[in-house]
Image: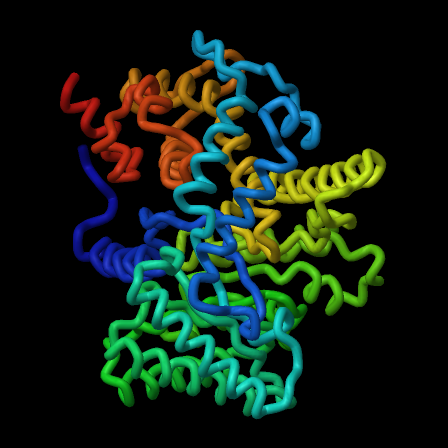
Amino acid sequence: MQLSLNQDQLEPLLSLLATSNQEFNARFPGVTIERQPVHTVYGGANLFKAGTTGKLSKLAQTHFATYATDHKVMAEMLGLPAEDTIGNGSSDSVTQRVYDRVKSKLETEAVEDHRVDFEDGYGSRADEEEDGHAVSAAIAMAEDHKSGALARSTGIRIKSLAEETKHRSLRTLDLFISKLVALTDGDIPQPFLITLPKVTTPEQVEVVCRCLALLEQKHGLPSHSLKLELMIETIQSIVSPTGQINIPALVDAGADRVVTAVLGTFDYTASCNIAGNYQDHMHPAADFARHIMQVSLTGTRVTLCDGITNVMPIAPHRGDALSELEIADNSAVIAHAWKLHFDNIMHSLRLGFYQGWDLNPAQLPIRFAAVFYFFLTGLEDARARLKAFIDKASQASLVGNTFDDAATGQGLVNFFVNGISCGALTARDVLDAGITLEELRDRSFLKIVENRSKAD
């Protein structure tokens, strides 16, 4: 067949594409294969003591056992059908499985990620007082690190680098890291994350990264062993003064240290001049910020994390000799807070945010309940669709009235990987989808299809 373009004409064009494609692939390597925690629990540095992680875990277990005595009670409080089955021939109730897995998770790993907070959860204090808490919190973290009592990932949140708090922020960072390194002989917890709140400019990110590099050099830590997460909670972090989306510039200023971007829902909506009584997790302004975060970061090495529910499931009446009316009042307050938290998390999950921040250990059972419910209720449909797709070795398929092609194949694989990594799904849950655990660990739909094509 005669072609109109010769190789000499095509070569510079192909070279231009190669350079562009390589740059794109470097920036967007795809959804991470590393396990992402489903939550970050944070609390004031003044409250952080050795054994805090274990204490939070026990409080979460006790709270769940007290107010969700069985799966039917939990279902009623969350407004869920108690007896819906998983499907695929199983007679198990969805909420029974959720309940059992929440109970197990709370007993084995109630806290996946933890931040010692020197910002909003800590407040503004005298310099001498914050100095003391920076040192005492580092001592407590070092003790728990040596005993293996920390969460699988941990870190601190410093104050913002706005003009009024920049000195205090960097001083606390220096004091905490220096003390922690000294007490652990440089064997600090990994991963270790520093959360930078209320970011407005790339220069703030650049400055904190320079400080982290100096601390690593000073204390002989491996380069980039101190990681950074950015809180997206100002309108300037979303849109730059010149009208550009600002998140990529903030991440680029992080010099490969930025691993997570966290939406600060209430600070962000406040910066949008929204009245306090209308600030809400599901406010359209918050969804706008989430979508900007997604289109900026999905497929990069930076994961997404959503914000808090600010209504706490805390019983108003305490003590052992409560009246029936007080007990009922406690249950109603807990049920309201649990339902709100559950709905907020489900909203985030549907939007593709698989991690969020929690303020109180009493919120942890519902964090897991929502995540587990999300995956278990989607299991039968995802399993059938992926199996049909793989059985045809990547040919487009129709299951019921749902059409799938290669664009959704990776998303179906991600569903199972994310579900297993957070404990919502088990290996038994996914084997019926027609994939092996080895294939699932690769997290690559293309590799699965390639394996099936070779087998055929």
Q: Position of residue 380 (x, y in %)?
A: 46, 18
- Can residue 251 be seen here? The reply is no
Is 288 drawn above or below residue 93 in the view shown? Answer: below
Is 139 drawn above or below residue 289 in the view shown? Answer: below
How was the colour assigned to the protein in this rendering? rainbow
Question: Residue furthest toward the front?
Answer: 321
Identify the residue shown where x is 71% and y is 44%.
320
320 lies left or right of 369? right
> Split into 4 quadrants, where in the image is the C terminus?
top left
User: Can you tell which quarter of the image residue 64 is in?
Assistant: top right
Q: Position of residue 308 (x, y in %)?
A: 63, 55
User: Can you tell which quarter of the image residue 412 is in?
Assistant: top left
Identify the residue shown where x is 46% and y is 31%.
101
> Split into 4 quadrants, where in the image is the N terminus?
top left
2 lies left or right of 381? left
Identify the residue shown where x is 25% and y is 28%.
449
User: Can you tell which quarter of the image residue 125 is in?
Assistant: bottom right
Q: Position of residue 23 (x, y in %)?
A: 32, 62
Question: Residue furthest toward the top?
Answer: 89
Count of marks placed on residues: 0
Q: Position of residue 105 (x, y in %)?
A: 44, 39
- Can residue 375 be seen here? The reply is yes
Identify the residue shown where x is 67% and y is 39%.
343
* Depth order, front residue of 53/325: 325
Is 383 drawn above or below residue 52 in the view shown? Answer: above
77 lies left or right of 374? right
